[in-house]
Image (cartoon, rainbow, N blue to C red):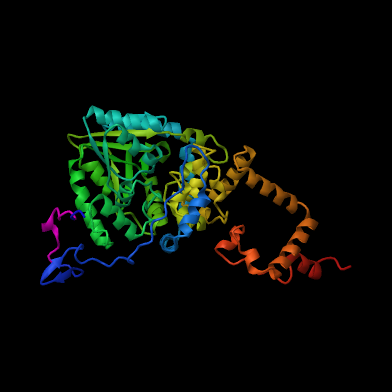
């Protein structure tokens, strides 16, 4: 077993720490004062969806594997529901919350319908701030552009803060293929990088992992004690292992939360200050910005900053809201403005408002399907309700099953800070996919049969009556078997004594 890395800056240890664990008058570091593992043989982490080229992702299959791992399912569900509850508490503390949402939605819709003009204004102002501006039509152009900048500077290593856009572009695998080392500076994203997994959530990328999973990843990759899943120990070990790489990196990269047209500046919100490391440690700073991130004026920022962190994590503000204007002295700043399908989406009448998304993750936290299936079960960059309406715009066939992974309860639309009608767009995608024959034959046949039954009231009532009798009298094993997906994780409801229809006939219907 590898020895855990030594403290890089032992002098920075606080001289008095009320939480320190002491032995023989000496402060033990977290490794020695270890918390106990959850149990001797931790539950293995269920992995995400199986991805085979453009074959339709079977989200249900991957979700079933998470559900079969009770510790993971419970933790995932509770952790995300906790975020949803915190978001509600913050929301109730702001009297004008609904006005803020309406304003944010209006600003985004205005910007998206004048996008060309605001993008040009942003570019002109960024150029006058001394920034190099590049345009990328798609993921390949983005990756090649960044590679070109790095090559021009002889850069061999790059530190990078979390960015869903770079995930979308397959940036890390591309950089690996051209021999450039990428180091993620966000802790969750670094965990995912070391585990060779995509982020499972837009805000908390490793939320699906138990601390025992993280202990296993770090033991395998940076040589920590596999039996020690103390979170302080793991975080400290990661910091000690990554900090030297950060200090030695040739270039830094960030994403962007908001880009302001009138100033040519952009803002990155983080809770770990990791974007500031990427932007300020090396002299070369590259920012990848999706073209939908533009907002017209500086004053609009306040609307979005007030909504973002409250919706995402239920906290009033992110720990760091960093503004970037131009290169620091002796440095260089590049912005890559990326389309990658956004212009096309803007032209889709039913789906263009999905571009308003500020990637807060609130729709994911509230979604009962997402909470019990995990982000990696979607087999796509974007998961949860927002993923269901964005992913098919990238590849209709591959993501044709995803819009069916929703109860359409509307909770996602209710919590969305920019008022995207998510559940209506999910429903609209179902229609589009059925019309374009992108759904499996079995599902089409089932839907057709259901349509036939529902369009014949007499047949429907007879079927319901027969089902009620069957449910009341059949032996349990006939109802609860592998063919009944509904009964696999819950009890089938008891049939009522009287259906609404028969009650209505008896009490409100025409008397014969
Ligand atoms: S769709 Fe709305 S709730 Fe979901 S991530 Fe985007 S902004 Fe947040």
Q: In which quarter of the image is residue 183?
A: top left
Q: Visible in this render: residue 122?
A: no
Taking depth in this image into account, of 483 and 455 the one nearest to the observer is 483
Residue 210, image x, y percentages: 36, 59
Taking depth in this image into account, of 231 and 298 the one nearest to the observer is 231
Q: In this view, does 72 lie above or below 303?
A: below
Residue 283, image x, y percentages: 20, 37
Residue under the image location 55 percent in, 36 percent down: 348
Is 387 situated left or right of 328 in this image? right
Q: Visible in this render: residue 5?
A: yes
Residue 129, image x, y percentages: 27, 33
Q: Is residue 155 above or below residue 66?
A: above
Q: What stretch is highlighted in magenta?
A: 4-15
**Which residue reaches farthest right?**
512
- In the rendered image, residue 254 lying in the magenta stretch gets the answer no
Quadrant for the C terminus in the image: bottom right
Magenta-highlighted stretch: main secondary structure?
A: loop
């Amino acid at each position: 077993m590898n020895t855990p890395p030594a403290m890089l800056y032992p002098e920075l240890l606080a001289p008095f720490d009320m939480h320190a664990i002491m032995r023989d008058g000496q402060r033990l570091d977290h490794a020695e004062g270890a918390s106990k593992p959850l149990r001797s043989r931790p539950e293995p982490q269920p992995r995400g969806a199986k991805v085979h080229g453009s074959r339709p992702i079977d989200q249900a299959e991957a979700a079933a594997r998470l559900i079969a791992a009770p510790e993971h399912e419970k933790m995932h569900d509770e952790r995300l529901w906790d975020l949803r509850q915190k978001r509600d508490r913050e929301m109730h503390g702001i009297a004008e919350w609904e006005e803020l949402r309406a304003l944010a939605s209006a600003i985004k819709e205005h910007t998206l319908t004048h996008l060309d003009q605001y993008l040009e204004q942003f570019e002109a102002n960024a150029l006058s701030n001394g920034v190099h501006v590049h345009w990328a039509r798609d993921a390949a152009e983005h990756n090649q552009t960044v590679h070109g900048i790095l090559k021009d500077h002889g850069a061999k290593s790059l530190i990078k803060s979390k960015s869903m856009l770079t995930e979308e572009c397959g940036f890390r695998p591309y950089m690996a293929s051209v021999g450039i080392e990428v180091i993620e500076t966000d802790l969750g994203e670094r965990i995912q990088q070391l585990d060779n997994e995509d982020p499972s959530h837009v805000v908390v990328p490793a939320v699906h992992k138990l601390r025992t999973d993280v202990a296993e990843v770090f033991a395998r990759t940076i040589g920590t004690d596999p039996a020690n899943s103390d979170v302080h120990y793991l975080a400290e070990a990661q910091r000690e292992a990554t900090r030297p790489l950060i200090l030695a990196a040739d270039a830094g990269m960030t994403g962007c939360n908001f880009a302001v047209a009138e100033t040519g500046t952009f803002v990155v919100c983080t809770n770990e200050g990791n974007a500031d490391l990427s932007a300020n440690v090396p002299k070369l700073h590259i920012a990848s910005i999706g073209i939908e991130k533009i907002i017209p004026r500086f004053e609009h920022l306040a609307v979005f900053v007030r909504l973002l962190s409250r919706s995402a994590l239920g906290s009033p503000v992110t720990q760091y809201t960093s503004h970037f204007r131009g290169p620091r002295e002796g440095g260089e700043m590049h912005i890559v403005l990326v389309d990658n399908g956004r212009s096309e989406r803007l032209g889709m009448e039913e789906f263009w408002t999905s571009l308003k998304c500020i990637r807060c993750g609130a729709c994911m936290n509230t979604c009962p399907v997402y909470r019990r299936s995990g982000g990696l079960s979607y087999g796509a960059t974007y998961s949860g309700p927002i993923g269901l309406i964005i992913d098919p715009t990238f590849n209709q066939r591959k993501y044709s099953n995803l819009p069916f992974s929703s109860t359409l309860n509307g909770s996602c639309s209710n919590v969305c800070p920019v008022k995207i009608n998510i559940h209506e767009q999910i429903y609209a995608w179902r229609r589009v996919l059925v019309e374009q024959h992108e759904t499996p034959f079995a599902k089409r046949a089932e839907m057709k049969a259901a349509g036939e039954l529902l369009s014949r009231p007499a047949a429907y009532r007879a079927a319901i009556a027969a089902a009620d009798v069957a449910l009341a009298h059949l032996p349990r094993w006939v109802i609860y078997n592998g063919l009944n997906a509904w009964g696999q994780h819950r009890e089938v409801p008891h049939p009522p004594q009287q259906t609404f229809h028969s009650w209505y006939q008896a009490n409100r219907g025409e008397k014969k």
